Image (spheres, helix red, strand yellow):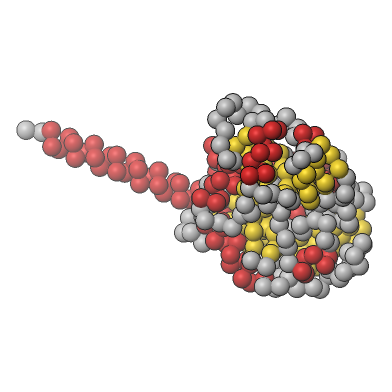
Amino acid sequence: MFDFLQLRKEKGLTIEEYDLYKMYDRPESFRHNFLGVNEQRYYLDLLNPTKYYILARNKYLAHQTLVAAGLPMVTLYAYYDPEAGRACNDTIAHSPKELLQILESKGVSECVFKTTETSHGSNVLVVKFINYDDEMVTLHNGEEKKFSELLTGKPMIVEQCIHQTAQMEAINASSVNTVRFMTLLYPDGSVKIPATFIKIGRVGRCVDNAGAGGNVDACIDTETGIMQDAIRFDGWEHITEIDNHPDSNQPINGVQIENWQEICEKVKTFQQAFPFVKAAGWDIALTNQGPFIVEVNDMWDRTGQQFIHRGWRKEIRDCFLAWQRTETNNEFGRLNNELSNRKLKIIVAQP
């Protein structure tokens, strides 16, 4: 209890973090550099201002913003919002009938449905076939449903399916296995990547998130692109170290991701084109056409520190301090200009 209270006082650590990450068994380097939710929120208030949070958290707005910046995204077929009123067009629908008509007009057969403001892979449905005559769909697992049953009453987007590289497909084919890139944008426009790890789904599941009932995760050496320290994550009390994927038996540890350096350089340009969020967590799908953005996170979770066996507090804090110094210098400059202008006005006003 004393140990926890010390970390609580020094870092704002929560009792949940202390317990889940087993801080009582961690080396001092991990304990010191672990970034908890309270300290993270303090840094991100500057790096990722809340006035911009909607641009990352709302999948429809994020998609439109990223596409407008020229970044690689899958095609957005439609946006469904039951509160959209009558302002409908060839992309926006407010009723199941209108949404079905939009998809049919675009010849959509397979697609992905996502609610716009959820995370951790919840409310994601992969549709493999749409029967427009019967208004029925076939899901990724072969289950058939009425089209109207896919709609939750909440806003949703309908996107093109992503087809990943053969390397990623071989590890697990039922999910798009994404790489999480942590990126930091500095005042001079440069970008650093403090951490990378991969999330891999299980056989028959269409998402790679642990929130869907378990997955596989592995650290990626940011310099080389080699996967290492793979684990089977079935909840905090059920973490198992593995070398191969438990379903496909494909090797994970020691395998280098293809075209890694080119992918890293491309992701850096993503961050430069999205300056609203200066500390971002990108979920990147690897395709034959290069890296595609699945989503960008402005308030990412802390779990990646478990996967990479180290904290990222120092890197986030360094970026925070760089922007803090810039803001301070800008404020001093503004005040000096204001004082100079006032002095000039006084001089000009004298007879």
| Residue in front for this viewpoint, 142 or 188 | 142
Q: Residue drawn at (81%, 36%), measured in percent from left and top?
A: 146
Residue 23 or residue 21, whichever sits in front:
21
On-image quarter of the C terminus:
top left
Is residue 182 among what the camera can see?
no
Q: Pick whichever, 57 or 151, lies toward us.
A: 151
- Residue 259 appears at what percent x and percent y? 67, 73
Which residue is rendered at x = 29% and y = 43% of the image? Answer: 337
In the displayed structure, 211 sits above or below 261; it is above
Residue 288, position as x, y percentages in the image: 67, 68
The spot of residue 83 in percent (x, y) is 63, 27
Q: Is residue 328 visible?
A: yes
Place residue 104 in its image quadrant: top right
Query: Measured from the top left, where is residue 283 in percent x and y?
Result: 69, 54
Residue at the image position 82 percent from the left and 67 percent from the top? 170
Position of residue 297 in the picture relative to residue 52 (left or right): right
Which quadrant of the rendered structure holds the N terminus?
A: top right
Q: Residue furthest left?
A: 351
For this rendering, which residue is in front, 4 or 106?
106
Q: Is residue 326 left or right of residue 17?
A: left
